[in-house]
Image: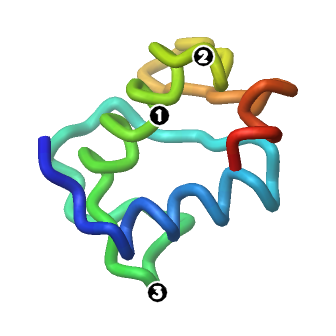
Amino acid sequence: MLIPKKNWFAIYELLFKEEVMVAKKDVHMPKHPELLDKNVPNLQVMKATKSLKSKGQVKEQFAWRHFYCYLMNKGIQYL
């Protein structure tokens, strides 16, 4: 999936600041609730965290239709 660079930066900035990101498993949600001002769709947040998980930079938990992504030390160095 192609994600605009400004959306990548918005996702990385929030993840670095909070060190945790919650994303609801809803691909039809128009915008991510924590990134409303940046106009980032929820699907792009889900795909970006999935990409970071595959690189080993984020630990992901799934419970009750929500993804909980925790930034690991390797991810902090990357960001």
Residue to which mark 2 is pinned: 60
What residue lies at 32% left-to-right and 52% top-to-bottom? 42
Between marks 1 and 3 in the image, the one whose residue lies nearer the viewer: 1
Quarter of the image containing the N terminus?
A: top left
| Front-lying residue, 33 or 76 | 76
Residue 17, given in percent of the width and then of the height, sits at: 81, 61
Q: Which residue bears the numbered disc 3?
A: 37
Q: Give the residue pinned by disc 1.
A: 49
Inspect the image, locate mark 1, and give the three-letter code of the amino acid beneath it.
Answer: Thr
Amino acid type, mark 2: Glu
Q: CA distance from mark 3 to mark 2?
A: 25 Å
What amino acid does circle 3 point to?
Asp
Q: Earlier in the sequence, mark 3 or mark 2?
A: 3
Disc 2 to disc 1, C-alpha distance: 8 Å
Q: Nearer the viewer, residue 49 or 21?
A: 49
CA gap, disc 1 and disc 3: 19 Å
Residue lying at the far front in this picture: please name it: 78
| Mark with earlier residue (1, 3) | 3
